[in-house]
Amino acid sequence: MDEFKARIILPNSRTVEFRGPADITEQQTDAIVNAANSYLIGGGGVDGAIHRAGGPSILDECRQFVAQHGQLPAGRAMLTSGGRLAARYVIHTVGPIYSGGESKESELLASCYRECIRLAEQHRMESISFPSISTGAYGYPVHQAAIIAVGSAVGELNTASSLKYVRFVLFDIATRNAYVSAAEKLVQTKNKYRLEEASS
Ligand code: AR6
């Protein structure tokens, strides 16, 4: 279970790849991203899976962060170690709760991807894995979220220095298909990008 479906190749040879159905806790990129809540106390979905697989040290670091800096607002990101995970770091970000689309949800969601990639760059990482932020418990319609996610990741990777590879790790087939379709649309409108797709 970790099927390659498609990748976008940028003019600078950097790559955004789409996999699914796949589990983000198993990824061996430098960082994996957690779709957290503002309290950074763990939860269900990706958040629960990452804390279960990574062990209690990640939650300890999250608690220290909140004690020092307060809650993490939607659209922002912070970094912990990866605990027992294969990834060296976890970047925790808080997606917007979808409430109809008129409450700056799209800006906040784009900001999540941008902030995570900037943190990865600050730590000189080469690779990062993202889940589909906000499209589970937070209710963001997946086709809309996918367009924002793919556009933001590609946009940031265009000007990145250390970061070479972004992977979207999509848990179910419907989510994966939404992201591949967003990738197809992006490449159709911007011909400087190249799309490779799996044959099946
Ligand atoms: N690997 C990859 N993707 C996963 C995994 C996994 N192991 N598990 C679930 N997904 P969600 P949100 C998918 O709800 O909408 C938490 O309780 C899932 O199928 O995890 O940002 C937090 O504490 C969906 O496609 O995140 C917050 O309170 C996507 O990940 C709240 O949920 C996101 O679903 C955040 O909600």
Image (cartoon, helix red, strand yellow):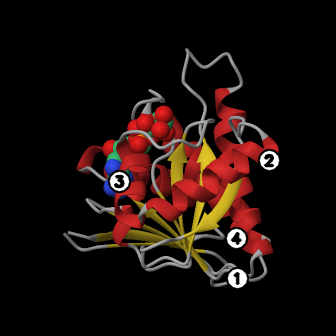
Q: Is mark 3 within 8 Å of ligand 1?
A: yes
Query: Would residue 136 be found to the left or right of residue 76 on screen?
Result: left
Given this view, does label 2 or label 4 mark the residue nearer the observer? 2
> Which numbered disc, 2 or 4, marks the residue that appears first in the sequence?
2
- The reply, left or right, for residue 194 in relation to residue 113 is left
Looking at the rendered structure, the secondary structure element under dot 1 is loop
Q: Earlier in the sequence, mark 4 or mark 1?
A: 1
Label 2 to label 4: alpha-carbon separation: 21 Å
Mark 4 residue element: helix
Which residue does the numbered mark 4 point to in the structure image?
120
Q: As shown in the figure, which amino acid type bears the numbered disc 3?
A: Ala
- Which marked residue is nearer to the observer: mark 3 or mark 2? 2
Q: Amino acid at mark 1?
A: Asn
From the top left corner, tell me how far across and down residue 17 is, in percent: 46, 70
Residue 66 seen:
yes
- Confirm if mark 4 falls within 8 A of ligand 1: no
Assign the C terminus to one quadrant of the image.
Answer: bottom left
Mark 4 burial class by Cα count in 10 Å: few <14, some 14-19, many 20+: many
Q: Which residue is mark 3?
A: 49
Mark 4 or mark 3: name the one nearer the start of the chain: 3
Query: Residue at horizontal 29%, vertical 63%?
Result: 22
The reply to whether discs 3 and 2 touch (Cβ–Cβ < 8 Å) is no
Amino acid beneath label 2? Gln
Q: Mark on residue 68?
A: 2
Please tell me whether mark 2 sits on a helix, a strand or a loop: helix
Closest to the observer, 85 or 19: 85
Q: Pointer 1: what residue?
A: 12
Residue type at mark 4? Ala
Alpha carbon separation for disc pair 4 and 3: 21 Å
- Tell me how far mark 1 sits from mark 2, CA to CA: 39 Å
Which one is nearer the viewer's eye here, 50 or 165? 50
Task: Pick the quarter of the image with the N terminus.
Answer: bottom left
